[in-house]
Image (cartoon, rainbow, N blue to C red):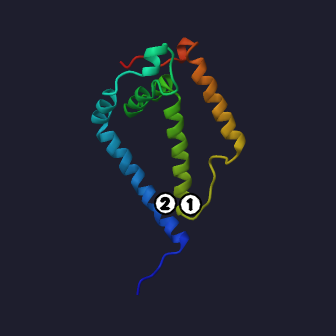
Amino acid sequence: MAQTLSAEQKRKRSELIVIIGVPVLLLLLYLFQRPIVSFVQMFGTCAFHTVTGKYCPGCGNTRSVRCMLKGDFLLALRMNLTMPFLIALGALFYIEMIFDVLGKKIRLIPRKIWLLVVVLVFFGIYFIARNFIPWLAPLPMP
């Protein structure tokens, strides 16, 4: 006799797949970082930066990820704050999901609109300021 799963059981199963899948995906990204970086570099330099001489919000993200893969998190922050921030945010959500699957609800990240506004304002100012403050601009990759 086929047993149908409840919505809660389906959600838990999906979360379990994510909990197992994320470390596997991260391991694959780490193992295949050279081909991935080579592929991304085929696109060349940022067209916005080439035309305007200013940094777009994405300038330095590839370099930031490469630095994180090498374990140099301070240099990753120097290249672009976006990727380290998003990875830290994702890690917090991942930890919340693990606790949820284990039966304990915790919230490490507030679900408030003010937090989203603060983050968006901060990054908006950062993306503009790094075009005028040299020590905020991304460095060339060593």
Disc 1 to disc 2, how far (Cα)?
9 Å
Identify which amino acid the numbered label 2 is placed on: Glu
Q: Give the residue furthest to the bottom.
A: 1
Q: Secondary structure at mark 2?
A: helix
Report the quarter where the N terminus lies. Answer: bottom left
Question: Which residue is at a point 32% across and 45% down the rendered structure image?
Answer: 28
x, y (%) of residue 27?
34, 45
**Label 1 SS:** helix
Q: Residue at x 38, y 20 (%)?
A: 141
Disc 2 target residue = 15
Q: Position of residue 42 (x, y in %)?
A: 30, 27
Say which residue appears at 53% left-offset and 14% top-offset.
135
Q: Amino acid at mark 1?
A: Asp
Q: Residue at x 47, y 20 (%)?
A: 48
Q: Are marks 1 and 2 in contact (CB under 8 Å)?
A: yes
Q: Is residue 48 above or below residue 25?
A: above
Q: Residues within 10 Å of mark 2 (few under 14, many from 20)?
A: some
Number of numbered discs: 2
Q: Position of residue 39 (x, y in %)?
A: 30, 32
Q: Quadrant of the C terminus?
A: top left
Find residue 130 and name its label: none
The picture quadrant where one finds residue 51 is top left
Compare residues 32 and 41 and report the one nearer the observer: 41
Foreground mark, 1 or 2, reads 2
Observer-nearest residue: 126 or 100? 126
Q: Residue furthest front?
A: 51
Indicate which disc, 1 or 2, sits on the residue closer to the N terminus.
2
Q: Residues within 10 Å of mark 1 (few under 14, many from 20)?
A: some
To which residue does mark 1 refer? 100
